[in-house]
Image (cartoon, grey):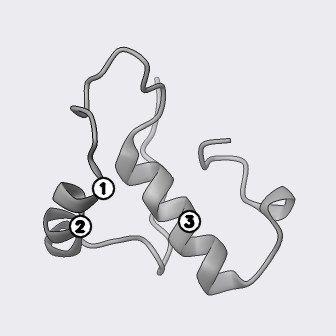
Amino acid sequence: MSTKPKPYPSDVSDEEWEFCASYLTLMKEPAPQRTHSLRRVFNALRWLVRAGCSWRMMPQEVPP
């Protein structure tokens, strides 16, 4: 059973995601070559910018 990870303060809200998604999506969300949710990747990048750390120090639950 998989539990949903607790969101980080830097995670995008539903309203922000609705605005950003259309600008970021070059292929449909369920595209076969996509292995991670675009929103999870976007949240990881926001966390990286907010925390100011290196990519190697990212939490384990974010996409590689």
Pointer 1 with pointer 2, Cβ within 8 A: yes
Helix, strand or loop at label 1? It is helix
For the residue marked with disc 1, what is the amino acid? Leu
Residue 16 lies, in percent from the top left, at 21, 74
Task: Indicate left or right for 49 with 60 as reference.
Answer: left
Q: Quadrant of the C terminus?
A: top right
What residue sits 45% from the left and 65% below the top? 7
Q: Dot 1, how many residues are within 10 Å of its Cα: few (below 14), some (14-19), or many (20+)?
A: few
Helix, strand or loop at label 3? It is helix
Q: Quadrant of residue 37?
A: top left
For the residue marked with disc 3, what is the amino acid? Leu
Residue 36 lies, in percent from the top left, at 47, 34
Question: Which residue is identified by label 2?
Answer: 20
Q: Quadrant of residue 57?
A: bottom right
Asked whether 23 or 19 is in front, the reply is 23
Task: Indicate left or right for 10 with 23 as reference.
Answer: right
Asked whether 15 or 9 is in front, the reply is 15
Q: Which mark is residue 24?
A: 1
Q: Quadrant of residue 47?
A: bottom right
Q: Dot 3, how many residues are within 10 Å of its Cα: few (below 14), some (14-19), or many (20+)?
A: some
What residue sits 56% from the left and 65% below the top? 45
Of the image marks 3 and 1, the number of the one nearer the N terminus: 1
Q: CA distance from mark 3 to mark 1?
A: 13 Å
For the residue marked with disc 2, what is the amino acid? Cys
Helix, strand or loop at label 2? It is helix
Asked whether 21 or 62 is in front, the reply is 21
Question: Which residue is identified by label 3?
Answer: 45
Q: CA distance from mark 1 to mark 2?
A: 6 Å
Residue 35 lies, in percent from the top left, at 48, 25
